[in-house]
């Protein structure tokens, strides 16, 4: 399994496919495997780079965590792999990392795809995530914890399929690389400390902002605000999706990404 040791922090990563490089950055409590529903469609035209952010998956979980540090991790990985420029797609917290990467290392970023994210988290979400962290640390009824989180990130249609819900819960409960309670809390603290509203207008990189039409955490109105804050951005609303756009509507997600990145140069 490939790891990059960045300033003493082992970071797990994968590469798949061929073509121009596309870095995918996962969201809160998610690792590289969260992109699996969309991978098949992307690897036909891109070299897809996946990593487990610090604090989750196979990367080190017991370490300092911030959006800036995770953005620097991404920059180190891009340079380690020998790419001059990459397209970057980030989901939720991963979108915040992508914005920070574009601010700190604009020379590395060709285009941005920001999925279900915002320049600053809402106070409601910060409080909600703190409640989730308290519950996760308590360690009681983990199935109910996952079911509650799924309610916030998936559409009602998902819950109408009991077999799918049961299979998803079994997968999450038996996942071989679970996030530690400490890693989860540090990631939500990183989210709460991120605020791009003062500098986002300086990010001149072409950007596609994606939103699920039924997203409870980051409603389409939040994505519309984000798109207006960026100098060169377009907004795309994905029907039939909530927060986890690439999971519920992978074909629409891939189609949008491929169309947006169609004119991208090789890295």
Image (cartoon, rainbow, N blue to C red):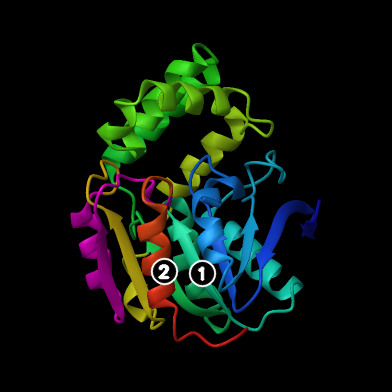
User: Disc 2 to disc 1, how far (Cα)?
Assistant: 10 Å
Mark on residue 257?
2
Residue occupying the point 56% across, 84% down: 107
Residue closer to the observer: 62 or 262? 262
Q: Can you see residue 19?
A: yes
Disc 2 is placed on an element classified as helix
- Relative height, residue 148 to residue 51 (above, below): above
Image quadrant in which you'd find residue 194: bottom left
Q: Residues within 10 Å of mark 1 (few under 14, many from 20)?
A: many
Q: Can you see residue 68?
A: no
Disc 1 is placed on an element classified as strand
From the top left corner, tell me how far across and down residue 98 is, in percent: 48, 65
Q: Tell me the quadrant of the picture where the C terminus can be found.
A: bottom right
Residue corresponding to mark 1: 88
Residue occupying the point 30% across, 76% down: 233
191 falls in the magenta region? no
Residue occupying the point 28% across, 49% down: 218
Residue closer to the observer: 254 or 185? 254
Q: Residues within 10 Å of mark 2 (few under 14, many from 20)?
A: some
From the top left corner, tell me how far across and down residue 34 is, in percent: 53, 46
From the top left corner, tell me how far across and down residue 40 is, in percent: 55, 58
Q: Which residues are magenta?
A: 219-246
Mark nearer the N terminus (2 vs 1): 1
From the top left corner, tell me how far across and down residue 250 is, in percent: 42, 53
Q: Residue furthest left?
A: 221
């Amino acid at each position: 399994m490939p790891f990059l040791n960045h300033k003493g922090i082992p970071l797990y990563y994968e590469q798949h496919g061929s073509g121009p490089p596309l870095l995918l950055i996962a969201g809160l409590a998610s690792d590289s495997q969260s992109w699996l529903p969309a991978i098949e469609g992307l690897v036909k035209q891109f070299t897809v780079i996946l990593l487990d952010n610090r604090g989750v998956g196979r990367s080190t979980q017991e370490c300092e965590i911030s959006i800036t540090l995770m953005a620097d991790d991404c920059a180190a990985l891009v340079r380690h792999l020998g790419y001059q420029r990459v397209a970057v797609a980030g989901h939720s917290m991963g979108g915040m990392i992508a914005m920070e990467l574009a601010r700190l290392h604009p020379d590395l970023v060709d285009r941005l795809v920001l999925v279900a994210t915002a320049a600053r988290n809402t106070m409601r979400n910060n409080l909600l995530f703190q409640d989730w962290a308290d519950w996760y640390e308590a360690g009681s009824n983990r199935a109910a914890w996952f079911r509650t989180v799924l309610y916030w990130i998936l559409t009602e249609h998902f819950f109408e399929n009991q077999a799918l819900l049961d299979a998803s819960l079994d997968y999450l409960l038996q996942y071989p690389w679970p996030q530690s309670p400490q890693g989860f809390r540090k990631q939500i603290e990183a989210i709460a400390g991120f605020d791009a509203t003062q500098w986002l207008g300086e990010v001149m990189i072409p950007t596609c902002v994606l939103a699920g039409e039924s997203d409870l955490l980051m409603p389409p109105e939040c994505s519309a605000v984000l798109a207006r804050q960026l100098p060169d951005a377009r907004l795309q609303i994905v029907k039939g999706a909530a927060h986890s756009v690439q999971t519920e509507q992978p074909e629409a997600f891939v189609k949008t990404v491929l169309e947006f990145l169609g004119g991208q140069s090789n890295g």
